[in-house]
Every structure is written in C-alpha cells, then in structure tokens.
Image (cartoon, rainbow, N blue to C red):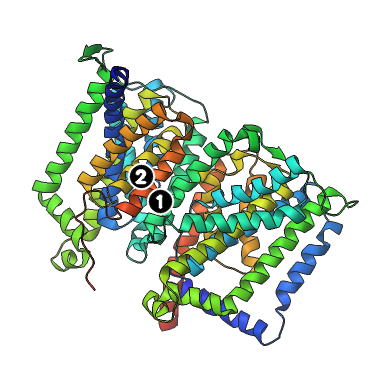
Amino acid sequence: MSDHPITLNKSESLLQRIRFGAPDLPVFALVAALAVLPLLVGGSWLFALGVCFANAIGVLSVSVLVRYGGEVSIGHSFFAAIGAYAVAVLDTRYGLSLLVSLPVALALGIISGILFAWPSRRLSGIYLAVSTMALALAVPEIINNMDWLTGGYEGLYVSQHVVPGVPMSLQRYYAALIVLAAVVYALARLRNSRQGLQLLLAKAHPAAADAFGTPRVWARIAVMGISGGLAALCGAMLGFAGSTVSPSGFTLWSSIFLLVGSVVSFYGLTLPRALLGGAFLTLIPQLLSASGAWIPVLYGFALLGVILIGHYLPRLQARKGKA
Amino acid sequence: MSDFLRDLFPLLWSGLITGCLYALGALGLVMIFKSSRVVNFSHGNVAGFAAFLIYGFSSGLLLELSWGAAVMLAILAVVAIAFLTYAVISPLIFESDLTATIATLGIGLIAQGATLLIFGADIVSLDLPIPRFGASVLGLFVTGYDLTVLGVAVVTIILLFFVIDHTKLGVAFRAISENPFAAEVCGLNLRRIHLFSWVVAAILGVVGALLIVPTTFLSVTTVAAFMLQAFAAAVIGGFASLPGSLLGGILIGVLMNLFSFYVSPEFSSTFLLAVILLALNMFPNGILARVGGSRV
C-alpha cells in the first residue's frame, strides 16, 4: 500500500521509545481513561464499547496481514467464527468460562490460519483475496449445517461468568478491553522482535529473507497463523461482549467490514488506530440503526474516501513542499 | 446404471446452461483484470443494481417502459457507472492494483446500499419476454429459456471474441494485457482501452444478470451471489484467459450441479471453496496454461 513506508517509520520511532524504556504515555492514558469509563457511562453504551473493542481486535487481525504479509483478506469472518463458536460452544455445552475457552479459541484460530495458509501458500495479491472470499462464503453454510453443535440459525447465548459476583455487563466490557490491550501490547513486542523483523524482511525482500533463512512460505504461514489467531480472539470477544453468537454475524459482509475498518484506520497497529477502526464498525451501525440501507453506502464512501486521501495527500504535500 | 445415465444427462445439460451464465460473468471479470490488473469486486452488485433498474423501469415503480427500452436504459446507466467507477479508481490503478481492488469493494458497497435505498429489501420477479415452450429431445427436457440462454451466450461470446481478435480495439486490448508499458510506448492510450474493457464487462454483467434472474427471483443478494460462481470460473481459467474462463464457467456449472445432486445441496459454497483452492494449487495459471518452469 502506498502509505506503508511513511506510517511504518512513524510507528518505528514510537516503538523505539518503548525499547529505550520511555513509556508511551498517551496510550497508557487512553487505557486508563477506558478503564474508568464504566463509572461515567452505563447500559447500552458500555455494551457498544465492549463490542467496539472486539471489533478493534478484528481490525488489527486484518491490518497485521496487510502490514506483515502484504496481503489483503476478505475472509476473516471465518477465523472470527471459529473463535466465537469455540467460546459459545464451551460455554453452553460444557459450562466453561472465558478463562478456559479464550486460549482454546486462540489456539483454534492459529491452527485454522495455518491450515488455510498451507494450500494457499503460493498465492498472493488478488488470487489470495479471491480464495479468502471463498472462505468467507463457506462460513454461514457450515455453521447452519452443523446445528447440532452450533445451534444453527438461532445461535447460542454466552452467559458464563469469568469472575463470580461481578455484574455481567462490567465483565463483558473489561474482558474485551483487557484482551484488546494485550493484543496491542503483543503486536508492539512483535514489531521489535527478531521474528517480526524476519517477517517484515520476507515481505519487503523475499530473496534476501530466503538467504537469511526465512523462506517465503514459512513467513506466509506464520503471518496467517498470527492473523487467524487474532481474528479468533476478535470472534471470541464478539461472542462474550456481544453475548450472542449467530451465523448472521459471520458473513462475507462482516469480513469486508473488517477490511473497511482496517483501511479506515490506515492499517495501523496501535491502540488509537485500532479503536478508530473498531468504533467505525460498531458505532456507525448503531447511529444509523433506523436507516440500515445507508450503512453500506456510508462504508463504501468511507473506504473510497480514505483510499483516495491516502493516494492524493502525499502528492499534495509534496507539491506544497516544492512551492 | 441406466438410472445413473438418465439422471446424468439432464444434470450435464442444465449445468452447461448455468455454466454459460457463469462464463458471461467471468468474461467481464477477466476482461477488466487483463487490461487493468484489477479484480472488480463490484461486478455482481452493479449488475444486480442494473437488474433492479430494469425491474423498476418496466414495472411502473420508476417508469412505465417496454422491456426493451428498460433494458437499454439500464445498460446506459451501467455504462455511466462504469465510467464513474473508472474515473474514481484510475489514479489508483497506476500505483497499486491491490489498492484499486479494495476500492472496487467500496463501489460494490455503494451499489448494494443504493439498491436497498431505492428498491428496498423485497423480493421481486423479473422474467424474460420469451415464449414458454418445452420439448423432449433425446430424453432431455429442453425449454425455451434454455435455448435463449444458450443462444444469447453463444452470440455474445462469439461477438466478444470477434471484436478482440479482429478489430483494432481488440488488438490494442491484447497488446495492453501482454505488456502495458510497450503498448503505451507504441502510442496506445491505456485509459481508453481500460475504459473499453470496463464498459464491455458491465454490459456482459447485465446480460448475465438478466438471464440468471428468471431461474430464481430478484433480491439484493441474488446477482451478487451468482457472480461469486463467476469468480470461481475466472479463477479456474487463471483469471487472465478469456477462453479459460469460458471453460471454467461451464466446468463450475456442471460440477456444482453434480455435487448438489449426488452429494449435498447444503454444502455448495464449501464445495466451491474446495474447488477454488484445488484449482489454484494445481493450475495456478489456469487450466489452459502451458506447463513450464520460470526463467531465473
């Protein structure tokens, strides 16, 4: 993408600060503000924010694939569905809480990401995009036909407490916030780690990475595993924070919306960017709930608008710099 | 055994008919991809919008026109949309084809939203003005609809291949899909050829949509769903080969038919996923590509 070099450099300087010990104050302030927010707002806003955090994780999972793999996916609802149903099935059939089901969801997401990456390891660009589209299309059908496990059309209700005695609405909010913060922290660590640098090298210079012992296929499978795992976490938190899991939440459109969120946040991997994408996916449908047909129109214009801004803004700035 | 054969022939025949329609959709996708290296994800939604326009123009919802006039008007609208789409994304094409591809998703979202806003989420029916007719030929039941689809598809495809093989525009189109840089150096106008392929693809999409809708009904998602098989057909053909996508369309039509009859109608999308992944692995450059190594 066109804005990669610019924004990547920015996040590099930010991460440099983390590495040298200076904490990234604005992000900590943001987390602290979100942590005390339940004192101020309540009810439906708390619920919407929990779903917003979950969607932010989903946006991150798509952005990771773009940033580290250079690939675009419109099939992440598949991995999200795996996470969501892992939580919901363990909850309703076995009475297990999120403490058990979240690691299971993460593991299943990583495994399915790898399983999908293997047959598609040589595909890139539009070929991969089309096969992820096919992946997303198969999801609602599979869920509906496995109704002995998934509850079919009606879906499942997630109700197990994580911490007994605390109101469920607070649990749904804080669990989503904690997982989102953990994901953002893990991604910041990944950017600095040897493995993260290897992945970036494999994306920018496949031949060089090959020479340094990172085959392209390995990099692709690793990135898809990470991205699939994050998407499964998104699904798990959508299930927990949103309290219900049903096939209508995991269609091709939900995958496309995740991509829209990722584009709108300029593929950012930081907390504010992820929240921007998540809020875009959660709050706009809520504001427009009375006139649902405007949602795709608005998303479409936002997608085009952000892409065109990403295209023209650097040029305008360059022209201004010259003048 | 005779039972099996008795089932098989009608299945192959109806698979061939729907396959022709998938091929029409796939040809549009491939034309756009060949010239401008963009996968047009808005193809199905725009064609669906056009089908709704035809319904609106001929049913008295928007206008009260004859069927032919409604089709002409809808085609005009679709050509205008193709111009507009190309105008928006053409600066992106020359920078990153993946970004331009994402942008077409935005166009598709807008087209779907516009359909919902104007026509609502209701289901309507849109028939072709053809005589109802059916005859048994060699144990096959052939209807007027089948023959219409086959006739229209064959004529459209022959016309398209004639234009591409024998006209100046077609030569320019092939030159650009082979090597855009060299074509530009030779004085060809890339944007004009791109526009040609976008407009032709849009018209092919409308034709495909018109022919597929009578088999089911018209809703916001019908045509978009139909175009997804067209995507599979294009993938099987390697996404850059017009004859390949024709063959891919027919193959998908027949395979889907056989699968839903003999195995299970409920898992057809999963089957499509398997076919796409298999095809991309076994024939990464399409079923008609010559096998060969790459030059190092």
Residue B275 vs B240, above or below: the answer is: above
For the residue pair B247 and B73, the one nearer the viewer reads as: B247
Q: Chain of mark 2?
A: B
Indicate the position of residue B212 as horizontal and vertical percent values.
34, 29
Residue B158 vs A121, above or below: the answer is: above
Kindly state the secondary structure of the residue where label 2 is placed. Answer: helix
Q: CA distance from mark 1 to mark 2?
A: 8 Å
Q: Is the residue marked by circle 1 packed among few (<14), some (14-19), or many (20+) residues within 10 Å? A: many
Indicate the position of residue A11 as horizontal and vertical percent values.
58, 77
- In the picture provided, is A81 more to the left or to the right than B140? right
- Farthest residue to the right: give it: A165
Residue, x 77% and y 48% (percent of image)?
A96
* Residue type marked 1: Val
Residue B17 vs A99, above or below: the answer is: above
Q: Are marks 1 and 2 in contact (CB under 8 Å)?
A: yes
Q: Examine the rendering and report whether any part of residue A266 can be seen.
A: no
Q: Chain of mark 1?
A: A
Indicate the position of residue B105 as horizontal and vertical percent values.
44, 50
Indicate the position of residue B68 as horizontal and vertical percent values.
27, 25
For the residue pair B276 and B144, the one nearer the viewer reads as: B276
Q: Which numbered dot is residue A130?
A: 1
Residue, x 60% and y 51% (percent of image)?
A80
- In the picture provided, is A164 more to the left or to the right than B45? right
Q: Which numbered dot is residue B231?
A: 2
Q: Examine the rendering and report whether any part of residue B211 can be seen.
A: yes
Tags 1 and 2 both on a single chain: no
- The quarter in which the N terminus of chain B is drawn is top left
